[in-house]
Image (cartoon, rainbow, N blue to C red):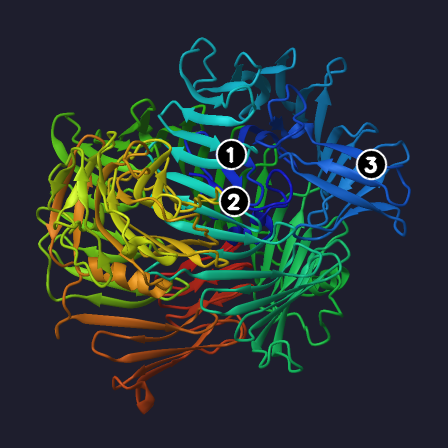
């Protein structure tokens, strides 16, 4: 729906998403079909919406039309509606240029602002905040400015007025930005001889066009209008229309639109909607901060801001709490409660920076990070002391990485990690990586074109470079490696050659299994793949070329070639619409956006129709035979009110179910036969236990309406046992109906219709005149009504309300409203508990179900009024509740958090039911006991992890234990399977010792395997099944006979 970040500024560039990586973003940002994404800054309440409307691939940096909205934005470059294109990024000087105390403020492509301070010693402007190395701005002799990214060395050139002129990569490839001389509006972004054109009418951008070359006939120029823009009466962007058939100018109706509305006369986005029904709706507080977000399926997020923290509450009442420091760095994240417990992750930063120093996970394991003066990460040490060190050159490029095999035994103490293994990276004068040397001396060489494109990769497999004289302080030189390579037997290498088209897109790749004495690949040994891409980077054609050498009858060697060609076509959204295989075999895909369906017709005529909801979740998949009549089966998918897939009905009609906890972890699965499997996790969500129950559950009646794609596991509404505390009784006023659901004074719950005078009066005797105590009530509502609606209220003293369908309390003395519980109008039973202590600092607390919502200071004004149920007034004349209420308890004891959770769990213990519903119908089927009783025939497996999150032991269903040992690089070194179920007996039936020479095995025997780390991994096997599972780095597998597999990470992987 919308992701959550923190940042001091607008946009994303210096947000927690960059400083903490994936951990700095909570939730998913993407929605809809156009690639649009949205974020809320939990520290400031700023809404960020971003989309890339157009892109042109080219040498170096691509040209793109990046469009970003900031709800708190001040500058956008054209019509002041808070939507900014990246081409309008700019520089502004504060103070006297080049003098002490002066600054340059850079507005980046996403609207974020970075302040560069003048360094008198260097004569440069420097920016040290954020993640990574220091960025700089130089003032050139002609008055222009040059910005340099500290990490990549990419530069941007701005004119003397601070307007963007060029973006340049390390090879000098230029992306040019042009502005209209009269209007100062962005007119074009040019990449080579192709361009993105911005077509304005006044200050309003009307459309974007592209001028490109035909990749298969570059003499042909293609001009297409790909996207158009519309505006409301206030000149705010109201619609973006993407032409789905840009190659056909006559077809003007086939478009996909995104529409925007705004709050009143402000620039605050009120809604975003798309052709397929995707929608986000936004509300705001008076200060402009985002208050709530709701999507088309009814899922919502409520933001409750406090000093130094923000609570994000979803439609189910689950609360995620984010805490941040004065720089808006995330310092702590609390998860939603699971069984009354919230999991905590903590972050600590180096003083005065946004660079993280410690990360402490929910299990208390702490990882330490350190940096050099330029902001580069130089040390990483986990809770067990496993240590990695990094070294950089003056251009902030990684030149050495050391992984220690023996952990640091005392963390920050005097002792250190030992037995380090160092890998080296060597660069040319332009900053291209030209050589890598693994810790064992394995060398890979990389050769580039003048445009900086990788043309050759050479892996020298027979020889090792002598690294004995090298260290992070004594680095290898490119010239030394060039000399060393020249002395090698050139036939002992693996060669990969790449060619590129005029845009720098890959045109062909050749991998040579054999190389001659000059280092030239032997054609008969090569495998070749060819590619054709369009200007947007979409693959139009792929050709696989297989070559072989054969000897004819006369003994002459001849070369044969076989090609397999496939072609692809796309619509304006970049979605695949046709795939053409050899022999003109076509697979076609048709998109019905309005009805959210996709129809795929395969080569053999079989069609598959898939239907989705507005979140893109698959609802059904129907397969039909080539006669378009015969039904080959339909699969149905069901989701709960939190958007999680809870049931699947396959083509045969069999159903399986999945239940989750409030952290979205699977806690139970139910097979087609009713087999129950339960799962348990540690605080880091690692699976620690799995139990397959011998007793089965009858699930036959759980879904009664197959046309309904909603299925929920929820708490039962009957029976509840009232426990300690004074149950209150009173007189019913007005017309209130009974239903046998929850014990109330007369043993029933009450149904309130919100009418004036319909309430339950409980009087004002001494038992309810409390200065401290606990109030409890069970309630259920679809819509309790607007404004305040009373649940249990003693006016001017204490009570529990709903306010616009959110659970709250109200302090009559100060006017404070405790409003952090979120929306509760989901049609399910909930329990509200309010513990209060008059005037005690943070002595009062509000709970929803078993979850603590917030603590605060509460004040009682006076005790003159009656206690009532179902109304906010003692005479039932206003604030009357709509829905069901029951189980009211007023207790003079102030319950603790543990007692609140225990009382809740006692009342619902062992009682669940499943619910299948949509907006028009609710069907329920009761299940007496999900938590099947344990039997001797249950089968349990368990896992144990160390402080680094590594699996160190498993216990199977028979009680037998397998233990795992690792080195300091977290590579598995030993596996022990114990003969008995008691690992302490130290009696093993099998020990698998995996010997490493640090991330490699060479010259292996049959059936070798390697699990590599971030160094280069190389395995040369013979007969048998050989495999590599690599991580970062270059991975190479040269296998003999047998099944060989390579599962590589990043970098170049060769099989």
Per the image, label 3 sits on a secondary structure element best described as: strand
Q: Which residue is mark 2?
A: 305
Position of residue 1053 measured from the top left corner of the image (x, y, whole percent): 50, 55
> Residue 518 versus residue 772: which sits nearer the camera?
772
Q: Indicate which disc, 1 or 2, sits on the residue closer to the N terminus.
A: 1
Per the image, label 1 sits on a secondary structure element best described as: loop
Residue 436: quarter of image: bottom right
Q: Which residue is mark 1?
A: 285
- Which residue does the image show at 40% across and 15% down from the upper left? 254
Q: CA distance from mark 2 to mark 3?
A: 32 Å
Please tell me the numbered disc located at residue 94: 3
The answer to the question of whether label 2 and label 3 lie on touching residues, with beta carbons closer than 8 A, is no
Q: CA distance from mark 1 to mark 2?
A: 10 Å
- Which residue does the image show at 15% across and 64% down from the upper left? 932
Does any portion of residue 649 appear in the rendered image?
Answer: no
For label 1, the crowd category at 10 Å Cα-Cα, with few meaning under 14, some 14 to 19 and many 20 or more, is: few
Does any portion of residue 981 appear in the rendered image?
Answer: yes
Per the image, label 2 sits on a secondary structure element best described as: strand
Position of residue 1043 measured from the top left corner of the image (x, y, whole percent): 35, 61
Residue 265: quarter of image: top right
């Amino acid at each position: 729906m919308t992701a959550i970040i923190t940042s001091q500024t607008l946009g994303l560039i210096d947000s927690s998403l960059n400083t903490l990586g994936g951990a700095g973003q909570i939730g998913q940002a993407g929605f809809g079909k156009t690639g649009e994404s949205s974020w809320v800054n939990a520290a400031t309440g700023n809404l960020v919406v971003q989309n890339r409307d157009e892109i042109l691939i080219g040498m170096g940096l691509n040209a793109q039309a990046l469009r970003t909205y900031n709800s708190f934005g001040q500058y956008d470059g054209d019509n002041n509606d808070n939507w900014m294109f990246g081409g309008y990024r700019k520089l502004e000087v504060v103070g006297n240029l080049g003098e002490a105390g002066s600054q340059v403020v850079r507005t980046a492509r996403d609207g974020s602002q970075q302040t560069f301070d003048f360094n008198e010693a260097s004569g440069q402007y420097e920016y040290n905040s954020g993640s990574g190395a220091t960025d700089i701005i130089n003032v050139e002799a002609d008055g222009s400015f040059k910005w340099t990214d500290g990490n990549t060395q990419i530069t941007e050139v701005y004119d003397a007025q601070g307007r963007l002129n060029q973006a340049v990569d390390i090879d000098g490839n230029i992306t040019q930005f042009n502005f209209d001389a009269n209007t100062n509006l962005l007119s074009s972004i040019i990449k080579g001889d192709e361009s993105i054109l911005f077509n304005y009418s006044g200050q309003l951008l009307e459309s974007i066009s592209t001028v490109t070359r035909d990749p298969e006939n570059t003499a042909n120029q293609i001009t297409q209008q790909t996207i158009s823009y519309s505006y409301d009466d206030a000149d705010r962007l109201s619609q973006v229309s993407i032409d789905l058939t840009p190659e056909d100018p006559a077809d003007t109706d086939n478009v996909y639109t995104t529409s925007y509305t705004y709050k009143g006369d402000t620039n605050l986005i009120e809604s975003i909607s798309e052709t397929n029904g995707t929608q986000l709706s936004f509300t705001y507080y008076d200060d402009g901060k985002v208050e709530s977000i709701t999507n088309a399926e009814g899922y919502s997020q409520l933001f409750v801001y406090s000093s130094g923290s923000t609570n994000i509450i979803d439609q189910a009442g689950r609360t995620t709490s984010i805490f941040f420091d004065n720089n808006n760095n995330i310092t702590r994240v609390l998860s939603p409660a699971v069984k009354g417990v919230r999991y905590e992750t903590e972050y600590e930063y180096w003083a005065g920076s946004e660079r993280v120093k410690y990360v402490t996970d929910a299990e208390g394991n702490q990882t330490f990070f350190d940096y050099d003066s330029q902001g580069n990460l130089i040390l990483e040490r986990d809770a067990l002391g496993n240590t990695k060190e990094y070294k950089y050159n003056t251009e902030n490029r990684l030149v050495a990485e050391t992984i220690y095999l023996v952990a640091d035994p005392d963390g920050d103490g005097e002792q250190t990690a030992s037995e380090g293994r160092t890998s080296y990276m060597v660069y040319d004068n332009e900053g291209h990586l030209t050589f890598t040397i693994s810790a064992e001396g394995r060398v890979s060489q990389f050769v580039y074109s003048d445009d900086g494109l990788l043309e050759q990769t050479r892996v020298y497999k027979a020889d090792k470079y002598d690294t004995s004289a090298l260290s992070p302080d004594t680095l290898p030189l490119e010239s030394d490696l060039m000399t060393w390579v020249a002395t090698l037997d050139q036939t002992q290498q693996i060669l990969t050659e790449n060619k590129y088209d005029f845009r720098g897109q890959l045109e062909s790749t050749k991998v040579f299994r054999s190389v001659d004495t000059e280092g030239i690949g032997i054609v008969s040994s090569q495998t070749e793949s060819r590619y054709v891409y369009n200007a947007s980077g979409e693959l139009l054609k792929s050709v696989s070329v297989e070559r072989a050498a054969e000897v004819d009858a006369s003994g002459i060697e001849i070369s044969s070639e076989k090609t397999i060609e496939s072609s692809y076509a796309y619509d304006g959204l970049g979605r695949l619409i046709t795939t053409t295989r050899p022999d003109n075999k076509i697979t076609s895909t048709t998109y019905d956006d309005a009805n959210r369906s996709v129809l795929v017709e395969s080569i053999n005529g079989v069609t598959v129709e898939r239907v989705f909801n507005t979140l893109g979740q698959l609802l059904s998949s129907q397969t039909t035979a080539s006669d378009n009549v015969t039904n080959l089966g339909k699969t149905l998918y069901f989701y709960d009110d939190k958007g999680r897939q809870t049931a699947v009905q396959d083509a045969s009609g069999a159903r399986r179910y999945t239940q989750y906890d409030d952290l979205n972890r699977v806690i139970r699965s139910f097979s087609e036969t009713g087999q129950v499997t339960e799962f348990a996790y540690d605080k880091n969500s690692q699976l620690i236990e799995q139990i397959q129950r011998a007793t089965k559950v009858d699930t036959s009646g759980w879904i009664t309406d197959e046309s309904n794609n909603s299925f929920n596991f929820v708490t039962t509404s009957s029976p509840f046992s009232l426990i300690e505390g004074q149950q209150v009784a009173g007189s019913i006023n007005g017309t209130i109906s009974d239903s046998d659901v929850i014990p109330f004074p007369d043993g029933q719950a009450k149904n309130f219709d919100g009418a004036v005078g319909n309430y339950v009066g409980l009087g004002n005797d001494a038992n309810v005149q409390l200065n401290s105590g606990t109030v409890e009530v069970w309630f259920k509502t679809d819509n309790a009504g607007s404004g305040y609606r009373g649940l249990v209220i003693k006016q001017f003293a204490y009570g529990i309300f709903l306010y616009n369908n959110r659970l709250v309390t109200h302090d009559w003395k100060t006017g404070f409203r405790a409003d952090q519980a979120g929306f509760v109008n989901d049609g399910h039973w909930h329990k509200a508990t309010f513990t209060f202590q008059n005037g005690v600092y943070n002595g009062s607390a509000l709970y929803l179900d078993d979850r603590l919502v917030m603590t605060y200071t509460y004040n009682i004004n006076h005790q003159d009024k009656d206690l009532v149920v179902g109304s906010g007034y003692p005479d039932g004349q206003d604030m009357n509740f709509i829905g069901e209420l029951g189980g009211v308890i007023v207790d003079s004891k102030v319950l603790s958090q543990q007692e609140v959770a225990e009382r809740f769990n006692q009342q619902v213990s062992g009682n669940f039911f499943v619910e299948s519903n949509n907006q028009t119908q609710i069907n329920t089927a009761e299940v007496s006991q999900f938590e099947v009783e344990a039997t001797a025939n249950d089968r349990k497996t368990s896992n144990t992890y160390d402080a680094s999150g590594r699996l160190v032991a498993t216990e199977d269903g028979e009680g037998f234990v397998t233990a795992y040992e690792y080195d300091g690089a977290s590579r598995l070194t030993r596996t022990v399977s114990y003969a008995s179920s008691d690992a302490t007996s130290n009696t093993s039936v099998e020990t698998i010792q995996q010997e490493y020479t640090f991330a490699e095995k060479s010259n292996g025997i049959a059936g070798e395997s390697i699990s590599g780390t971030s160094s280069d991994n190389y395995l040369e096997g013979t007969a048998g099944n050989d495999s590599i599972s690599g991580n970062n780095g270059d991975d190479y597998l040269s296998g003999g006979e047998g099944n060989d597999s390579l599962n590589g990470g990043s970098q170049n992987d060769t099989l």
